[in-house]
């Protein structure tokens, strides 16, 4: 197979094979931009390596050929003593995983070529600085040597020379440091630092392959739902040097502000530095606009290229570049990660600029981003005193106790205590802590530092570069002036303003939530500033278009007036699932106990039912009234009866205590204990519940149905327009539905006659057993609608008891690649999804117009919604806060 692609051979659409970095380097090369010569080793090669433990021999041969072409092209040979070619060996997977995998710079330097580089460049100091960097990076990433050994040696060298800046070290210092570094390698590995350039190259390539499976890379992928089996490509790129002096430099830039989306010149530069220095936050960077005064020609060229790339990719780009003695080189481009707010603003701007269509704009924003914008914000009217300020790196309002390391962050998360990870700067090793923390605060680094980039990617609140804070991770203190904060102290950070507050600041609705619940005009009126106005307009534009194009209707799951109102204000087009369980709890419990405990046909049972009926009617009436004119699907009672009875263990303990004291259990308790024992089930989820309960306990379903129809009749008489629907849970056989349906029809007829009104009350069923889906063509004969209960359908299709599996062995299942994400979170398209598809097709084969919906948690999950659109159901139903998300995703699915 072809394992190696020259930059001339690839293009941006080959991310699977060449990784994002490689595909885009090829694309820039093809656009005629100044890309240093190089080539990309494919992800196929990586997968082969991870499978076999060795690189394919063919790959080695192809690397040799491609390398020799690069050598011929630049007129230098890898690591040659006189005038060496040096290369970087860079990881790059299909999906960008910033800082997660390895890159080695300056490959090809050794004891001889360092002299050649010094002579040719006329800059001895630069040559030795590059060599010591190679040994340091190579030792750490390729040879697995503890990186602190190198940085400690560097620190103590600086200390001896009485300086803090790397740049103050002299050539002699760097030579000495290089010797120390070589000694570290010899000591730690038992062999000298490899001098043979090709050996360095091959080892570095393997190290990049291996880094795909590093712990931090795996954590990152799990979080970002990136499959483990993709593998990384490796890019071999001719080195260009930003550390050759003050006419050289390196930087990163964005074609628009990745946190606000504003157009402009955004980026960070460092003069006289090599790539890694910017991202690592080791030295404080200068804003990109400063480049104009350092090197006007390169600045102008870069601005031109930025515009060209944004036009070419039709999106905001994230770019890495290096200037070597006044010559600009492009080292990386990708469509940039951005905050949720920036995503909406940028999509809208690009439409205004005529660069993308409105349909395309919809694909540029996600339900998850919308969800992020619905997070509450700090309430400015509380006027908290700003403790200190950093850069707004990733928006949101986060509060928590201070922690200084990963372990403390994870412990805090486990204990359910929100925390803020406070660091000088973060590096990829801090990922665990960032995942666990509510927010991240650093004292160094810019908007493109590791902490900022990773936090934005995760949608985690971050404030970076709060320079007034002195962070001491060893002493576990964060000091501003004479105020010392310690682990466990509470702070609040605002990732939208960069402000840091002491203690807990109250929160309020975000402008987007205000827009979603009160509409455009009200939100614009309440907007705090221009930024909010832009954001609200951009979100409105996306939502309006989504509503226009979507085929799926969006209903809500709601079982109380408050949720019903909330959902309605968020645009719900009806209630897809009104659970009735909670209507049997609280002070109604004794009635339910009486109902269960009294014998069939007894007056006692009837009395309990009669007492419950008006209460239920009240519940339904209020909700039907709020949902006036829209469908409200009421599910008859579903859970196992014993959930309404006292706990078996508690009663048994009570009995044992009484016995031990030589007493008898009171009679009521004895009766209850007997009943509880009788009703006890080994596997309640598969036991007496849903329709089974309705058939087993006559009168119960009728009572609920009567209450519902009565409530609707009363509203009808008041001139309202109620649309109740009766939904029967856990149907497995047509006959079950038929029995309930007959009862329903009788109830509807008699109640409507009583009130003297008439209207349709559809009777349908849930499809949540595979048997129901597989026999849906017959069930459809008795059903006016179907609603797929995807939670239970996932349980019953997989045979997983949700409560017993999710926290227990699912992590191992995800790790082992059995599924990428819990099937309870995102619909298992190939299994459960197929059952749904079967149910839809069979149901429609009987009744082509049968209304079908989805009412599990999946109804609000972005990926699942895409599937439900494809499978052709009529609506999804989800929790109130997910309604806007579902509207947007349904729109995205339709373009
Ligand atoms: P990451 O994916 O972590 O950003 P990169 O492969 O982009 O890693 O490389 C890390 C840093 O090294 C970047 O700042 C990049 O610009 C710099 N770099 C990579 N290759 C070269 C090269 N050939 N010449 C100069 N700098 C380079
Ligand atoms: Mg990079
Ligand atoms: Mg169910």
Image (cartoon, rainbow, N blue to C red):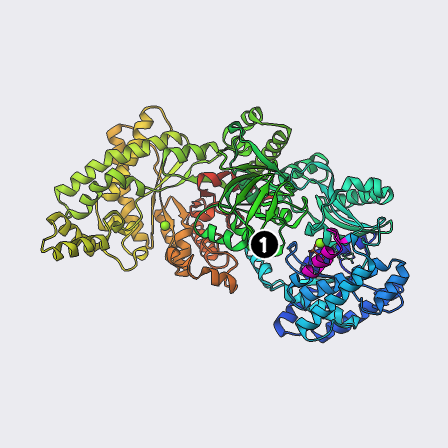
Is 248 in front, or is 224? Answer: 248
Crowding at mark 1 (Cα within 10 Å: few <14, some 14-19, many 20+): some
Between 222 and 729, which is closer to the camera in this rendering? 222
Q: Position of residue 751 (x, y in %)?
A: 25, 33
Q: Is residue 164 magenta?
A: yes
> Does residue 385 appear anywhere in the picture?
yes
Q: Quadrant of the C terminus?
A: top right
Q: Is residue 682 left or right of residue 396?
A: left
Which of 566 and 599 lies nearest the eye of the viewer? 566
Which quarter of the image is occupied by the N terminus?
bottom right
Residue 323 is covered by the magenta coloring: no
Secondary structure that dominates the magenta span: helix
Would residue 704 be found to the left or right of residue 104 on screen? left
The residue where tag 1 is placed is 430
Residue 752 falls left or right of residue 771: left
Asked if residue 550 can be seen in this view, the reply is no
Report helix, strand or loop for mark 1. helix
Q: In the rendering, at what x and y percent does residue 449 appear?
A: 67, 48
656 vs 4: above or below: above
- Indicate whether 754 appears above or below 103: above
Tell whether 696 sits left or right of 235. left
Residue drawn where x is 42% and y is 32% of the image: 565
Magenta segment range? 151-166
Q: Percent x, y for residue 438?
A: 52, 45
Residue 343 picture location, percent across and down: 63, 41
Q: Is mark 1 within 8 Å of ligand 1?
A: no
């Amino acid at each position: 197979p072809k394992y190696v692609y020259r930059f001339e051979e690839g293009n941006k659409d080959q991310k699977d094979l060449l990784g994002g970095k490689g595909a885009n380097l090829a694309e820039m090369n093809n656009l005629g931009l100044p890309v240093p010569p190089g080539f990309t080793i494919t992800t196929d090669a990586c997968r082969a390596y991870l499978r076999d433990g060795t690189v394919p021999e063919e790959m080695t041969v192809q690397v040799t050929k491609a390398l020799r072409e690069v050598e011929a092209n630049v007129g230098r040979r890898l690591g040659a003593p006189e005038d060496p070619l040096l290369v970087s060996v860079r990881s790059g997977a299909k999906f960008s995983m910033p800082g997660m995998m390895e890159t080695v710079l300056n490959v090809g330097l050794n004891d001889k070529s360092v002299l050649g580089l010094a002579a040719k460049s006329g800059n001895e100091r630069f040559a030795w600085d590059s060599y010591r960097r190679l040994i340091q990076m190579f030792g750490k990433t390729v040879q697995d040597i503890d990186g602190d050994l190198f940085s400690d040696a560097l620190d103590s060298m600086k200390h001896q020379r009485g300086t803090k800046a790397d740049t103050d070290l002299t050539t002699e210092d760097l030579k000495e440091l290089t010797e120390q570094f070589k000694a570290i390698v010899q000591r730690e590995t038992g062999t000298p630092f490899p001098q043979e350039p090709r050996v360095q190259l091959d080892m570095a390539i393997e190290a990049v392959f291996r880094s795909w499976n590093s712990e931090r890379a795996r954590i990152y992928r799990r979080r970002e739902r990136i499959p483990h089996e993709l593998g990384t490509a490796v890019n071999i790129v001719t080195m260009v040097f930003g550390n050759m002096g003050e006419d050289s430099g390196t930087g990163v830039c964005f074609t628009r502000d990745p946190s606000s989306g504003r157009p402009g010149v955004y980026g960070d530069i460092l003069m006289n530095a090599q790539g890694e220095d910017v991202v690592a936050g080791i030295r404080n960077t200068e804003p990109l606009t400063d480049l104009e005064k350092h090197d006007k020609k390169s600045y102008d060229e870069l601005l031109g290229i930025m515009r060209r790339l944004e036009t070419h990719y039709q999106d905001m780009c994230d770019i890495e570049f290096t200037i070597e003695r006044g010559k600009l080189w492009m080292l990386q481009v990708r469509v940039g990660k951005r905050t949720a707010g920036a995503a909406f603003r940028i999509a809208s701007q690009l439409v205004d600029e005529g660069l993308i269509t409105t349909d395309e704009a919809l694909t540029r924003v996600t339900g998850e981003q919308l969800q992020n914008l619905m997070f509450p914000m700090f309430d400015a009217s509380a006027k908290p005193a700003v403790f200190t300020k950093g850069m707004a790196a990733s928006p949101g309002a986060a509060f928590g106790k201070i922690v200084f390391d990963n372990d403390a962050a994870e412990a805090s998360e486990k204990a359910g205590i929100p925390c803020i990870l406070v660091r000088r700067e973060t590096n990829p090793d801090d990922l665990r802590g960032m995942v666990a923390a509510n927010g991240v605060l650093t004292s160094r680094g810019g908007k493109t530092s590791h902490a900022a980039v990773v936090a934005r990617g995760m949608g985690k609140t971050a404030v970076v570069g709060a320079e007034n804070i002195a962070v001491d991770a060893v002493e576990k203190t964060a000091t501003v002036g004479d105020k010392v904060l310690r682990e466990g102290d509470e702070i609040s950070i605002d990732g939208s303003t960069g402000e840091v507050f002491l203690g807990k600041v109250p929160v309020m609705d975000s402008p987007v939530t205000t827009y979603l619940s009160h509409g455009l005009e009200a939100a614009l009126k309440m907007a705090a500033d221009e930024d909010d106005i832009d954001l609200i307009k951009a979100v409105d534009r996306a939502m309006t278009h989504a509503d226009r194009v979507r085929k799926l209707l969006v209903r809500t799951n709601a079982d109380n007036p408050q949720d019903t109102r909330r959902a309605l204000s968020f645009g719900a087009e009806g209630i897809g699932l009104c659970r009735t369980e909670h209507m049997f709890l609280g002070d109604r419990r004794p009635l339910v106990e009486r109902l269960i405990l009294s014998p069939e046909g007894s007056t006692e049972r009837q009395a309990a039912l009669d007492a419950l009926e008006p209460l239920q009617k009240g519940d339904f009436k209020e909700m039907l009234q709020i949902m006036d004119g829209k469908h409200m699907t009421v599910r008859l009672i579903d859970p196992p009866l014993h959930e309404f009875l006292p706990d078996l263990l508690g009663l048994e303990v009570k009995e044992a205590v009484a016995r031990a004291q030589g007493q008898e259990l009171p009679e009521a308790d004895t009766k209850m204990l007997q009943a509880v024992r009788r009703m006890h089930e080994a596997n309640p989820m598969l036991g007496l519940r849903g329709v089974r309960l309705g058939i087993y306990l006559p009168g119960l379903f009728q009572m609920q149905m009567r209450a519902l129809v009565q409530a609707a009749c009363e509203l009808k008489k008041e001139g309202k327009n109620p649309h109740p629907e009766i939904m029967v849970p856990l149907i497995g056989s047509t006959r079950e539905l038929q029995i309930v349906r007959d009862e329903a029809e009788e109830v509807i007829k008699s109640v409507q006659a009583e009130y003297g009104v008439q209207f349709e009350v559809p009777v349908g069923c849930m499809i949540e057993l595979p048997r129901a889906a597989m026999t849906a063509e017959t069930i459809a004969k008795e059903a006016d609608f179907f609603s797929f209960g995807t939670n239970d359908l996932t349980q019953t299709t997989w045979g997983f008891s949700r409560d017993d599996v999710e926290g227990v062995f699912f992590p191992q299942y995800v790790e082992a690649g059995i599924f990428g994400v819990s099937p309870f979170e995102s619909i298992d398209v190939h299994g459960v999804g197929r059952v749904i598809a079967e149910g839809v097709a069979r149901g429609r084969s009987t009744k082509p117009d049968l209304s079908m919906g989805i009412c599990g948690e999946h109804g609000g999950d972005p990926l699942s919604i895409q599937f439900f659109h494809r499978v052709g159901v009529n609506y999804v139903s989800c929790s109130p806060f997910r309604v806007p998300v579902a509207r947007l995703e349904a729109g995205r699915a339709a373009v």
